Structures are given as C-alpha cells and as structure tokens.
Image (cartoon, rainbow, N blue to C red):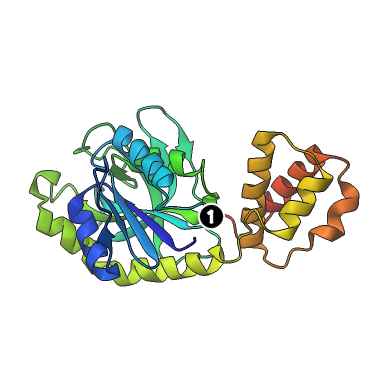
Amino acid sequence: MSGVFCFVALPAEAKPLIRRWGLQKISGGTPFPLYRGPRHSLAISGVGQINAAAALGYAMAAGIASSDAVFLNIGIAGSRDRPLGSLLAADKIVNAVSGKTFYPQFPFKSELTSCELISAAAPVTDYPDPHAMYDMEAAAFYETAVKFNTCELIHCLKIISDNRLAPPELITENLAMAAIEGQLPAIEQFLARLTALSRNAPDTDDPDYSRLLATYPLSASNTVKLKKLLQTLRLLQPDVKLDEERTSWRNGKDLIAWLERAIAQHPFRY
C-alpha cells in the first residue's frame, strides 16, 4: 500500500484535507481520529509532542500508513515576520525540549521556500529566531516517522498563521481551515512529485534487496537499515546498477558503508 499518509494536530487543519480527498472516518473507539480514502489516509493527533508520537505509532499499528507511503505533516505555524498564509517546507527540524535536530532530505528541487522549524513545548509568541517557524508537533512526528520510512518521503509543510503583527490569540478555527485550504494546490503539487518518486522505492520483494540479504548476512537492525538505504538510493538514482559494485563489498559492513557514501554524495541532496 502506497499513497499519502497525512498527519495533522488539529481538526481544523484536517477538515479541508478530508473534504478535498473524500476521506472517511474509520469507525470504532480509536484513541486518535483516523481517516482513509483511495489514495490518502490521515491522523489527527491533538496538540503536543507526546500526542504526535503516540498518534503516528498508533496509525502505523492500525495499518492506515505503510512504509512505502509519503508521510506528510501539514499544519499551521508561527513566524516573526513571514506573511500570513505563506507555505513553507521544513529543511531543519529542532526539538526545543530535547535539543535533537533533524534534516529532512529533498529528492528534488522544490519551488517551496524552506526554513528551520522549531517544535516547542508551549506556544511561542516572541519568535526569538526571526527566520524560523514554530510549532509543537513536527519534531516528534519526524523522529517517529524515520523509524518507519525513508527520510526522502517524510516532510513537514507549514502555513504561517501568526506573526508579530497577528499574535496566535487571534487564530480561530475558520482561520486555520482557510490557511490550509488556500495552499491545497501547492501542497498537492508537492505531494504529486513525492508520490511519483515513492513508486520507485523497493519493498521487501525487490530483487536487489532479496539478493543482497542472501549474499551478505546482516543483523536485524542492519536489515532494516539496508531497506531504508536502498529506498533512498533508488529515489535519488532510479537507474543505479548495484551488480556493477558488488566486487568492492567483502561483507555486509562494506555494503552498508557503500550505500551510505553513495547517498551522501548525491548532488540533489541539500
């Protein structure tokens, strides 16, 4: 199952997406609202990093997202000077609580403006970094998502809902809905490029994956790592010929190291 798994914090952020994609709520007593359609699925976490991590883990366990889908966190965020309604992609995500930093990888040159996104434990109203965006969930979403998927298929898109001229106290449900709705064409354009790439990502039935595992025994953790590295390399270089490189690999450690070097040297990573 591929497609798009969309992750939002607030019902107001979800409503335009549910309407646009014709999503239906999954019935039953789920701890987090889950929605599914032919090509999209969606989870609503509630506010905060604990909720974000728990909701994503639950969605994976419930089977509404899979490791070959595009994972996208969509929501509103604050920024000191950026215009209201602006759509930006996160190229650096900082967890202000733990200090952990993550760097989403773009497998193509996006037309979207990108900047740092800082996830705080409480709403930020003074915007200490004038160039950054602020939210409360993205870092936990990203840190959890990379356990299930390759980083090229995990992204955070934010629409500016507040700044120093329009403080967060002025945000209403209608404003949040309008912010998402106004950027749906650009969001869908970004998603179209990512979903096209995701179709090239190998799964556990990929011949290269199976042959490499048979030739180079790996630990359980490196088996998972091999799959992610193959997915990443295939996304960045769909025509790569792994058979031509095999003579340089003496063991599984050499294989993993070669894949990491090949990905790090790719010219489209930034």
Say which quadrant the C terminus sits in: bottom right
240 displayed left or right of 137: right
255 displayed left or right of 82: right
Category of crowding for the residue at label 1, using alpha-carbon neighbours closer than 10 angstroms: few (below 14), some (14–19), many (at least 20) = many
**Residue 84 seen anywhere in this rendered image of the structure:** no
Residue 191 image-quadrant placement: bottom left
Q: Is residue 17 above or below residue 53?
A: below
Q: Residue furthest right?
A: 247
Q: Considering depth in this image, is 75 or 63 the residue closer to the camera?
A: 63
**Residue at screen point 76% across, 46% down:** 213
Q: Considering depth in this image, is 103 or 222 the residue closer to the camera?
A: 222
Residue 122, position as x, y percentages in the image: 23, 33
Q: Amino acid at mark 1?
A: Glu
**Residue 16 seen anywhere in this rendered image of the structure:** yes
Q: Residue furthest top?
A: 98
Residue 53, position as x, y percentages in the image: 37, 37
Secondary structure of residue under mark 1: helix
Residue 203, position as x, y percentages in the image: 62, 56
Residue 112 image-quadrant placement: bottom left
Residue on which disc 1 sits: 152
Q: Considering depth in this image, is 79 or 222 the residue closer to the camera?
A: 222
Residue 184, position as x, y percentages in the image: 29, 68
Question: How many numbered markers are drawn?
Answer: 1
**Residue at screen point 28% across, 64% down:** 23
**Residue at screen point 68% across, 45% down:** 226
**Residue at screen point 72% across, 68% down:** 239
216 displayed left or right of 226: right
